[in-house]
Each structure stands twice: as structure tokens, then as C-alpha cells.
Amino acid sequence: MALSLAAPSPALAQASTPSTFERAMLAELDAPTRAEVERRAVAGNTVKGVIGTILLNNYYAAGARRPGRALTVVAIDFSLGVVVFRRAANVFEVQRFNPQTLRLLR
């Protein structure tokens, strides 16, 4: 399951209930992580946006390769346990993560 976070549509940002796709992402998570995502996915925050933010925060917490540089999550593949971060226009970094806990694997 891959998803792109580069340009969320306005309709998705206003959704009050998770889409079928977002429910599939939630089903991949363990119970504590799912509860955290659901708790934070309110007031316009989408499930995929919260998951992207958690992965980004986990990246910085684990020791970013270039601290202080802005990153954007551009894709998440749950089946492979891979997140793609964009550093600049044509500069990407691929990181593996545990699809159940969203913790980065190093």
C-alpha cells in the first residue's frame, strides 16, 4: 500500500471519517499506535497526514542525517515498510519503518 502526501486534496483535508484507504492504513498499525493516530486525526488532520507526521518526528528523534533541514513525506509504502522523504526538488531519502509501530529501522 503506497500513498503520496505531496499534495493533499482539499476534500481529503475536510473528511470527518477515515476513507477506506485510511481505514486500511489504520488496520496495519498495532493497537497503541492506532489509538494515537485516531486521537490526533481530528480537526482537519487526516489519518495519512498524522502517520506522515509521526514518521517525520520519528526520523528526527532517531537522529536525522542532516538535522535542521526541512523534509517532506512524499510517499509511504506499508507493504514494504518504506517512507520516502524529500529534502529538495530532486533529493530524496528512503527509510525503512515498522508498519505496526511506525518506528524507523536503522
Image (spheres, helix red, strand yellow):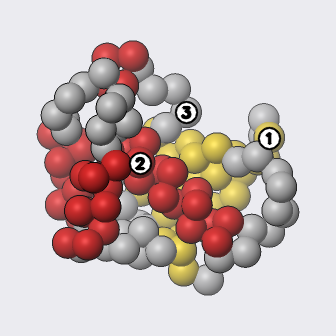
Observer-nearest of 18 and 35 = 35
Q: What kind of residue is marked 2?
A: Val
- Neighbour tally class for label 2: few under 14, some 14-19, many 20 plus, Cα within 10 Å: some
Residue on which disc 1 sits: 88
- How many angstroms separate mark 3 from mark 2 (CA)? 14 Å
Mark sitting earlier along the chain (2/1): 2
Residue on which disc 3 sits: 6
Q: What kind of residue is marked 1?
A: Ala
- Mark 2: which secondary structure? helix
Quarter of the image with the C terminus in it = bottom right
Q: Residue at image x 49%, y 38%?
A: 5
Camera sees residue 39: yes
Q: Residue at image x 46%, y 39%?
A: 4
- Neighbour tally class for label 1: few under 14, some 14-19, many 20 plus, Cα within 10 Å: few
- How many angstroms separate mark 2 from mark 1 (CA)? 22 Å
- Mark 3: which secondary structure? loop
Camera sees residue 3: no
Residue on which disc 2 sits: 50
Determine whether 31 is above or below 105 in the image.
above
